[in-house]
Amino acid sequence: MAQIEIRLPKMGESVTEATITNWLKNIGDSVEMDEPLVEVATDKVDNELPSEAAGILVKCLFEKDQVAQVGDVIAIISTDGDAAVVASSEEKVSPSIVAAPTTEVEINATIDAVVATNYDNSDKFYSPLVKSIAEKEGISLTELDSINGTGQSGRVTKKDILDYIETRGTQPKVANTAGVVTIQDSPKVAPTMPASENGSNFLGSIKAPIVVPNPGDEIIEMDRMRKLIADHMVMSVHVAPHVTSYVEADVTEIVNWRNKVKKGFVAREGENITFTPIIIEAIVKAIKDFPMINVSVSGTSIIKRKDINIGMATALPSGNLIVPVIKNADRMNLVGLTKSVNELANNARNNKLKPEDIQGGTFTVTNVGSFGNVMGTPIINQPQVAILALGAIRKVPAVIETPHGDFIGIRHKMYLSHSYDHRVVDGSLGGQFVRRVADYLEQFDENREL
């Protein structure tokens, strides 16, 4: 029987694993060459993987929501039409396992039903097999989180949870006093992750409180992307001391110019020109003036980036956020920037981004003004050291200076909020940079030709 192994391919420079989110074919189904076989999700982007062979899907080696490493065999396809179908390789709990004595857990029914058995509510990853064993043995979420995992990145394996069950009767007892869960043992410090290369401990040393829902509250599970965003934001704030500088920019000339050229641009190029590429052009010019904004930190070393790759935070229909990257933005003219912005934004909203589309950013811009906000305090997109938030463009009364005296007029203005990593970007550099961006915006030529 000829069998073809389907392996998880490399999907980007820094991508080492992926979560199986959905099998598009069932065991026993016919599969054509290059036909979508499985949906996977990385910490970068979601992808459909095509089949590398035509035949019958006879084996799936990973279940939905399990994590596979790059190079792992995830499925087997038989090229023989009469091949026997093989059951999934998901490990089964041995029927010889006898339930071990449980501890005295006296927690009210609401906590038990909502917190203890909802294993997806944890900030740790548990395989479906581990969650199944935990549910069968009546292990609460708090109890499961306390198990020291020996798998990759400290994950709890089947062996870990079975070993824990065998010695479970000797674990500290849990008591409930007036609805408050307390451990009848001396306090223990939460285990921490090894220090990262920049000398910081993050995520592993941070324990979020367990919140008990009140009657009538709705519980909404975070999806995979929201969990990744949450982890990334917590890590960034923990690693980098954030400072934010603000500048108000007069963009009246840009507004007037865009109003003048936008119809002709659509007729000529077949797409709209927004304010985003115009502002990105100004950011790129300012980065050339202040190249130490375009850096990353590795331990006690500063990596000065040669390329200027601008990430643009994009809101998805789901409410989540993704940051596609315009590579070598300094080599593009305004038309090229406009086309790149539109293409990446459309691909993001239609879930068509490739892994390389969201890698390699050196500076990020986020448009909080699109939601009607006048300013914001954005969180740095690690491993970058700065991010610029664009506020809403508003008509405001302003003092206009002329050789013949000052007068009050109506101008289009916006706030720029520049957050930066104070480990390597001081207030002088951070403030001068955002001021320079505003200068370039205010110096825009209203008679510019496209």
Image (cartoon, rainbow, N blue to C red):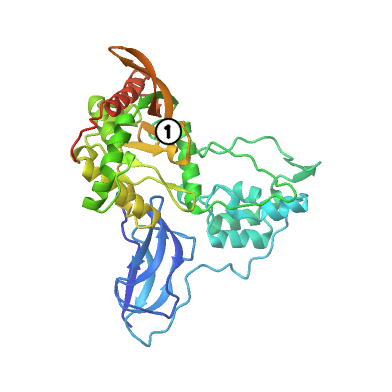
Q: Is residue 96 left or right of residue 49?
A: right
SS assignment at label 1: loop
Instruction: Name the one closer to the observer, 421 or 447.
Output: 447
Figure check: 77 above or below 329: below
* Residue drawn at (25%, 36%) of the image: 308
Residue 16 at least partly seen:
no
Drawn side of residue 113 relative to residue 89, left or right: right
Residue 208 x, y percent position in the rendering: 60, 39
Residue 368 against residue 437 in the figure, above or below? below
**Residue 106 drawn at (x, y percent):** 78, 49
Residue type indicated by callout 1 = Gly
Rendered position, 417 above or below 214: above
For the point 70% across and 47% down, the residue is 213
Residue 54: x and y in percent read: 31, 78
Q: Which residue is mark 1?
A: 391
For the C terminus, the image quarter is top left
* Residue 49 horizontal/vertical position (percent): 35, 65
